[in-house]
Image: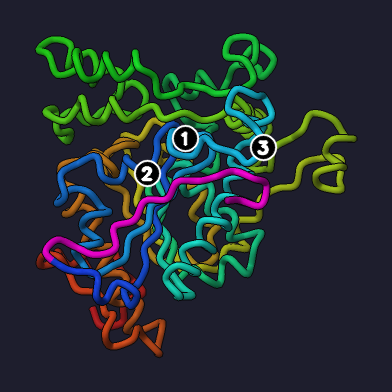
Amino acid sequence: VTEDGFILGVYRIPYGKGENSERTAQRPIFYLQHGMFVSASSWVANPPYTSLAFTLADSGYDVWMGNSRGSVWSQKHVHYSPESPEFWAFSFDEMAKYDLVATLNFIMKKTNQEKLYYVGHSQGTTIGTSFSTNPKLAQRIEFFFALAPMVSVQHSRGPLKTLMSIPPSLLKVIFGRKELFPKSALSQFLSSQMCNRKGFNILCTDFLFRVYGYDRENINMSRLDVYLSQNPAGTSVQNIVHWNQILHSAKFQVYDWGNPTANMAHFNQVTPPLYDLEAIKIPTAIWSGEQDRIAPPREVDNLLPKLPNLIYHKKIPYYNHIDFLLGLDTPQEFFHEILYLIKMYMKHYRPYGLPSNSKPRCASPPKRPPCHLLLWVRDC
């Protein structure tokens, strides 16, 4: 339960295939945060070998997956009903300020551990901005792994950019003031009964590619119904209004409540404060895709110089926004690199290391990243 009353769902994979729970408490922790319009199920949508959550569990980690408020598994509140506008009066600000703090506190208490590795995808990286405003929370993060990071949408393209460009007043007329793109019986029917049929599957994938970017060769067409039956998983109209503000102000700022009086009540200043990315001192690694329509290369290139402790960045030429979740070659492109980065970080940058009984192991032989990509690794 968050400080402001939201009841969140959290998924856990405490240990890998063929193992038991005897050593779960000693396993290092990975926390995975999903992006916009999806839920924690996006981390396990693919078969185990190409799902990051299962791979990390099989590699010796205790894996937790959060669900942001408003997504399908986090639509409860101690006071408000999802039918009330008050329930939906949030954006990613509250996800960062309340959801992430409550979820990580719960995990730390449950496992009796003090540190974890954070993986965010899309808006899941945006939620990581909490590390810039909450130093106590930031101290708990060993490493920040950012997949298709989002802090600006100036150069985004496609239907989502169009949605974010709609004036807030018109957006509220069209969609109301509550939930946007909820998981529904109709969407589940269309995805399960239509999208795997010959002819219709092309239409379904074309829709995905128009939104996220094109990479037809890297998607498992046989699981299209699984992908689309779980998504979209809902968010608030206010969340899109927040991205509209970021788009038009060209500033990575907190939500503008619309007038100086309301802003004074929330921030003690008449204009919304900016997020200070330079305050994120956590070791950070980024993977981005050149075909990404939501977090395109130009946006990522603008982000990189603002991060003071950027350890690694890899730009994958053919990746779109959702290849990081659904791609067929995710193990080769970045799963093993995450494990390798941790290994090198533990060796060179964290001298006290992990307890001897909790050192992670690779689920399968790692593909060592080229040394020129890991400039900080001293023994390449």
Q: Was residue 364 drawn as part of the magenta stretch in this picture?
A: no
* 304 over 243 or under it: above or below: below
Q: CA distance from mark 2 to mark 1?
A: 9 Å
Q: Which residue is mark 1?
A: 71
Q: CA distance from mark 3 to mark 2?
A: 24 Å
Amino acid type of the residue tagged 3 in the rendering: His
The span picked out in magenta is 1-18
Q: Is residue 36 visible?
A: yes
Q: Which residue is mark 2?
A: 40
Q: Which residue is mark 3?
A: 79
Secondary structure under tag 3 reads: loop
Q: Position of residue 208 (x, y in %)?
A: 30, 24
* 237 over 97 or under it: above or below: above
The residue under the point 84% across, 30% down is 259
Mark sitting earlier along the chain (1/3) = 1
Q: CA distance from mark 1 to mark 3?
A: 18 Å
Are the residues tagged 2 and 1 within 8 Å (C-beta)? yes
